[in-house]
């Protein structure tokens, strides 16, 4: 791959990551209403993920003759990698996260979930051999400080709920690394379908095992309305996220994703009248971190990553 083509591909990845951040910010805002409407967070997440999986299947089926690539996995390693993305990224951490959320303080939970960029950076350096400059760590520090400020501070101890949320966040970080390796040999649509397909199947299985499967059949029209809306948004998030990850460094696209907090804060201010002034300083710190890492990635061509093996 020539240097110019690498640069163009990387920049498209960054723009896709920025689009993903916008979608994520909207999704976080809508999910707050959706989960309240359904009442059971695991049932809501399962239904939403199933809808997203069906939307992705419909899009890839319709686009098959129009250049939309769904590549067939080659060999058991790629198949098991796709299953891992579905289980490690699309199901188990959701159960851990919502169980932890029920036990943890909202302040600790909000911050721990946002440390994803740190864990992805560490894994990307060790496993993916991505090259980070000192300024990358400065940018990641700004993102973490901004998130800590928005969360209202970080306590000194971790209870069982906080540990479950941390475990979920670590699993999502591992998913990013596995997906990045798979994207060396598979299309982003293939990985996205696996994430939502295998993940949804695992979540439905969990509901059946725990005796909550019947709740999916008792949702009313209003609840299904929220599920369909947020499921559609989730499908857009998955499509753009894996497309971005296929084109740029894992740490760069994960860092840009943190900017979703700006979108959520803006929507809360416009729709709910939540004042921005108390958050403005921390939002500017986030913006500074995201802008810095985006500028570093925009200007500098990273070394190509090894293809999936």
Image: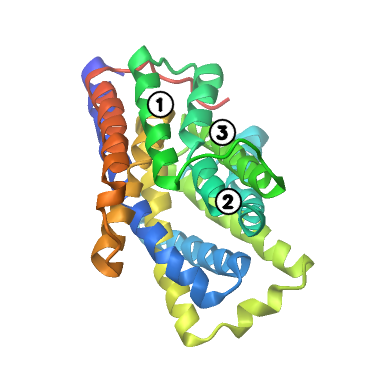
Residue identified by numbered label 2: 90
- Label 3 sits on a secondary structure element that is helix
Please name the colour scheme applied to the rendered image: rainbow
First-in-chain label (2 vs 1) = 2
When the figure is inspected, residue 59 is found, relative to residue 165, above or below; the finding is: below
Front residue of 59/23: it is 23
Q: Depth-wise, is mark 2 or mark 1 nearer the camera?
A: 1
| Cα distance between the residues tagged 2 and 1 | 27 Å
Q: Residue at x 41, y 15 (%)?
A: 131
Q: Find residue 183 and report its horizontal and vertical position in percent.
A: 47, 34
Residue identified by numbered label 1: 141
Q: Find residue 176 and report its horizontal and vertical position in percent.
A: 51, 36
Q: Residues within 10 Å of mark 3 (few under 14, many from 20)?
A: many
- Label 1 sits on a secondary structure element that is helix
Q: Depth-wise, is mark 3 or mark 1 nearer the camera?
A: 1
Front residue of 249/45: it is 45
First-in-chain label (3 vs 1) = 1
Residue identified by numbered label 3: 178
Residue 177 seen by the camera: yes
């Amino acid at each position: 791959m020539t240097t110019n083509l690498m640069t163009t591909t990387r920049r498209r990845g960054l723009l896709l990551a920025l689009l993903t951040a916008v979608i994520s910010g909207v999704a976080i805002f809508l999910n707050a209403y959706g989960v309240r409407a359904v009442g059971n967070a695991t049932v809501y997440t399962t239904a939403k993920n199933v809808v997203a999986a069906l939307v992705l299947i419909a899009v890839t089926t319709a686009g098959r003759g129009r250049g939309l690539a769904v590549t067939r996995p080659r060999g058991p390693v790629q198949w098991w990698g796709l299953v891992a993305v579905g289980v490690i990224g699309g199901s188990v951490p959701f159960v851990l996260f919502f169980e932890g959320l029920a036990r943890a303080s909202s302040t600790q939970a909000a911050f721990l979930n946002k440390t994803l960029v740190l864990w992805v950076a560490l894994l990307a350096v060790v496993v993916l051999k991505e090259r980070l400059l000192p300024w990358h760590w400065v940018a990641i520090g700004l993102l973490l400080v901004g998130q800590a400020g928005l969360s209202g501070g970080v306590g000194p101890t971790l209870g069982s709920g906080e540990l479950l949320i941390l475990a979920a966040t670590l699993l999502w970080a591992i998913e990013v690394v596995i997906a990045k390796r798979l994207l060396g040999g598979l299309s982003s649509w293939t990985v996205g379908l696996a994430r939502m397909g295998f993940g949804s199947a695992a979540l439905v299985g969990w509901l059946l095992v725990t005796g909550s499967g019947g709740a999916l059949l008792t949702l009313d029209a209003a609840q299904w309305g929220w599920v369909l809306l947020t499921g559609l948004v989730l499908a857009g998030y998955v499509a753009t996220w894996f497309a971005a990850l296929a084109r740029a460094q894992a740490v760069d696209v994960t860092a840009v994703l943190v900017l979703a907090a700006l979108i959520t804060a803006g929507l809360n201010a416009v729709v709910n009248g939540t004042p921005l002034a108390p958050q403005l300083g921390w939002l500017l710190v986030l913006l500074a971190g995201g802008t810095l890492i985006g500028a570093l990635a925009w200007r500098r061509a990273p070394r190509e990553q090894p293809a999936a093996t």
